[in-house]
Amino acid sequence: MPHVVAVVCPNCQSEANFEFAECVKIKLRADIEYFEKSQFFEVEKIQHSGGQFHNFVFYYHKQRQNNLPELNDLPENYDITDWAHSQYLYRSHGFDIGVVVCTKCQFQKKHNLKWPDDAYFKIQYKGQNLWAFDLSSGLELLKFIQSTDRNRANFLHRSFLMKVPALFLSKKARPEIGKKLTSILEENT
């Protein structure tokens, strides 16, 4: 999943961006105080499925204009790049925490993502949801659905397209899904 996805703004229902926070597990109990006092980080104690609690340090990129601070006084064994987004489209943690920013109504708030319920580019067909991460992947999805040659190697979002359920790919579904996707995508181009 990309680090930034298009979501429905909780305030005005327009398209907004959600960006995942990055987090690092605190290595030593003595490090907690440094991070709690920092203006850049937030510490949260989270219980894992095994019942154990761990302290994590979160960094919210959207709240800092996506710039990592230059810090020379981090505790030993930490580097500011620990909170950088990975070059790969996955998170280094399983948390759905981040920030929603809407340019239409200026809404900005921490948010716990509920995907695909929060997806902005989402349609329904036969009671099932079909969604895209953003406008770009939505356009690629439309091209893929409408294509008679679905060789995924010809598409930019190959891994995303590999997970499209067969229900949406049938010849019978193609006209209705194409129409619905075109409608939602045209509103945003």
Image (tube, rainbow, N blue to C red):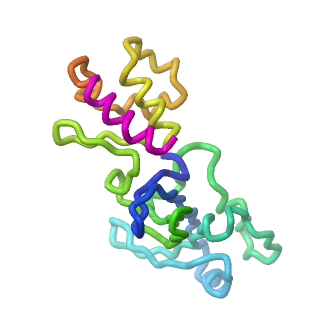
Q: Nearer the viewer, residue 113 or 136?
A: 136
Q: Nearer the viewer, residue 151 or 75?
A: 151
Q: Nearer the viewer, residue 82 or 84?
A: 84
Q: Residue 99 at what x, y percent from top left?
A: 52, 66
Q: Residue 87 at what x, y percent from top left?
A: 64, 45
Side of 162 relative to 156 (left or right): left
Q: How many numbered discs, if any?
A: 0
Q: Residue 179 at what x, y percent from top left?
A: 32, 30
Q: Residue at x 32, y 55 (%)?
A: 117
Q: Nearer the viewer, residue 43 or 131?
A: 131
Q: Residue 58 at what x, y percent from top left?
A: 57, 70
Is 183 covered by the magenta stretch?
Answer: yes
| Residue at the top extreme of this rendering | 149
Side of 64 relative to 48 (left or right): right
| Residue at the left extreme of this rendering | 126
Q: Is 77 located above or below residue 120 in the figure?
A: below
Side of 72 relative to 160 (left or right): right
Residue 145, picture quadrant: top left
Tell me which secondary structure the magenta stretch mostly adopts.
Answer: helix
Q: Which residues are magenta?
A: 174-189
